[in-house]
Image (spheres, rainbow, N blue to C red):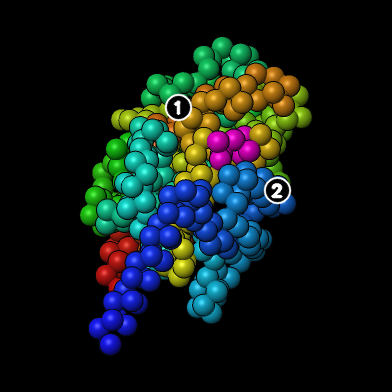
């Protein structure tokens, strides 16, 4: 009897299974449930314009990826301090905008490597960011890329075309050497007795200015192994030449001259028509929209090679992000040509993507009332040197500011100062 009951049960089960199979074969397949929604946060700094542009770009992404929601976390001041507080409190943003302090985060394991994501999606960094990879080298440590460059305008040369024309000097090009640059600055400097009424060039103590000269001369701040090399012959020669522009050749203003002119920066002097050339970033264009003189921009000149700083910021993924795959999808989209288009459209900044830097929308700048050589930014991207970003970037800059400040005020000699900086950096890096 037990055998019969078991046989009956097996027959019934086989009939039910057959019926299920028939239903599956004859009826449309039921679609798999949609992916679970993902909620991410993205922290950034800046202004109201930055908020507007980030929102536009995120909305573009969400329109194509409705299951991934991105909440913007705007931190207008004390950015790094507040992000670190969030990390310590267990509320780290999933995606973090970072800049020169990227390796302060990477060295603490607070952000993750993007290598596997880049490889999986076959993202060619040189195609996306230019021949040198833009800021990708600077944002890498020990072979790992920790942030995808998002914005990245280079340090470029602004020049007053009217002053050049009056002095009979040819406009600057990236092929200028220091000899040609100095010759031009001397011709463009006008004096009334001992008083300079027009400077040929203006710079100062900000690190992108003097650091570019070091790399133009084939020097470096850190070597390939990440160790300081600031007292090399090339670096010392570069700082000496840079400072001689002020105190030997008197073609550029000193800190005291700046104070007498009521400012501490080259930008306003250039806008006021008091200097023929200055170096700054993309943002300088906005300050010249009402200028009454003719001006333009060009890539930086060179000495032994072309070299320039690329400013900008990158997007990193927090180690605490619960869905790094979705976070990467956001980052990859925002740094794509389409994702960078609003940066150009809203005149927010120079995009990091080389395709956008070379696009008609960026090059033609329809909002400008005169032609501007916007191609200078794309050309400069290909001459970008890898910024010496280290986990001790802030401390390193403090050492430079303290010591070079004395040189730039003409209170210290270059060689012993660079030797002192080298010694202090070696000690710092050994800690």
Q: Is residue 340 magenta?
A: yes
Residue at the image position 76 percent from the left and 29 percent from the top: 290
The image's mark for residue 109 is none
Q: Quadrant of residue 191?
A: top right
The one of 185 and 321 positioned closer to us in this rendering: 321
Q: Secondary structure at mark 2?
A: helix
Q: Secondary structure at mark 1?
A: helix
- Outermost residue toward the left? 225
Please rate how many residues cluster around mark 1, counting C-alpha atoms within 10 Å: few if below 14, some from 14 to 19, many from 20: many
Q: Quadrant of residue 67?
A: bottom right
Give how far across and how far down residue 133 sits, in percent.
Answer: 37, 39
Q: Is residue 83 visible?
A: yes
Residue 198, placed above or below residue 104:
above
Whole-angstrom CA distance, mark 2 to mark 1, is 28 Å
Q: Quadrant of the C terminus?
A: bottom left
Give how far across and how far down residue 69 sits, in percent.
Answer: 60, 57
- Callout 2 touching callout 1 (CB < 8 Å): no
The image's mark for residue 52 is 2
Image side of residue 272 versus residue 135, left or right: right
The one of 299 and 18 positioned closer to us in this rendering: 18
Q: Quadrant of the N terminus?
A: bottom left
**Highlighted magenta segment, given as a residue range:** 338-344
Residue at the image position 29 percent from the left and 38 percent from the top: 218
Residue 164, placed above or below residue 15:
above
Give how far across and how far down residue 159 sits, in percent.
Answer: 58, 26
Question: For the residues carrying marks 2 and 1, which lies nearer the camera in this image?
Answer: 2
Image side of residue 277 versus residue 240, left or right: right
The image's mark for residue 379 is 1
Does label 2 or label 1 sit earlier along the sequence? 2
Q: Is residue 195 visible?
A: no
Give how far across and how far down residue 265 sits, in percent.
Answer: 62, 45
Q: Is residue 337 magenta?
A: no
């Amino acid at each position: 009897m037990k055998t019969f009951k078991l046989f009956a049960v097996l027959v019934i089960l086989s009939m039910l299974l057959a019926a299920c199979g028939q239903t599956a074969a004859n009826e449309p397949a039921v679609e798999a449930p949609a992916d679970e929604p993902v909620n991410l946060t993205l922290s950034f700094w800046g202004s109201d314009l930055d908020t507007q542009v980030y929102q536009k770009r995120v909305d573009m992404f969400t329109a194509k990826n409705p299951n991934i929601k991105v909440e913007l976390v705007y931190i207008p001041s004390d950015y790094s301090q507040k992000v670190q507080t969030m990390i310590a409190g267990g509320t780290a943003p999933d995606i973090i905008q970072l800049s020169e302090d990227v390796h302060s985060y990477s060295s603490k394991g607070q952000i993750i490597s993007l290598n596997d994501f880049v490889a999986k999606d076959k993202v060619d960094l040189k195609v996306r960011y230019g021949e040198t990879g833009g800021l990708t080298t600077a944002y890498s440590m020990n072979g790992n890329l920790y942030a995808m460059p998002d914005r990245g305008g280079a340090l470029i040369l602004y020049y007053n075309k009217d002053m050049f024309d009056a002095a009979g000097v040819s406009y600057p090009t990236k092929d200028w050497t220091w000899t040609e640059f100095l010759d031009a600055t001397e011709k463009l400097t006008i004096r009334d007795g001992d008083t300079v009424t027009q400077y040929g060039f203006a710079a100062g103590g900000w690190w992108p200015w003097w650091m570019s000269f070091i790399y133009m001369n084939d020097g470096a701040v850190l070597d390939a192994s990440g160790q300081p090399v600031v007292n090399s012959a090339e670096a010392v020669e570069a700082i000496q030449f840079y400072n001689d522009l002020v105190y030997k050749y008197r073609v550029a203003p000193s800190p005291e001259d700046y104070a007498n002119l009521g400012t501490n920066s080259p930008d306003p002097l250039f806008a006021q028509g008091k200097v023929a050339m200055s170096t700054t970033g993309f943002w300088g264009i906005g300050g010249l929209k009402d200028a009454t003189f003719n001006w333009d921009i060009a890539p930086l000149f060179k000495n032994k090679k072309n070299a320039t700083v690329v400013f900008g910021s990158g997007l990193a993924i927090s180690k605490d992000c619960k869905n790094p795959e979705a976070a990467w999808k956001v980052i990859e989209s925002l740094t794509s040509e389409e994702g960078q288009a609003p940066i150009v459209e809203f005149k927010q900044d120079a995009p990091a993507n080389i395709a956008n830097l070379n696009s008609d929308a960026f090059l033609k700048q329809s909002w400008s009332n005169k032609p501007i050589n916007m191609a200078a930014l794309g050309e400069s991207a290909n001459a970008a040197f890898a910024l010496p970003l280290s986990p001790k970037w802030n401390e390193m800059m403090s050492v430079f500011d303290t010591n070079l400040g004395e040189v730039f005020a003409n209170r210290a000699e270059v060689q012993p100062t660079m030797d002192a900086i080298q010694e202090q950096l070696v000690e710092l890096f050994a800690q």
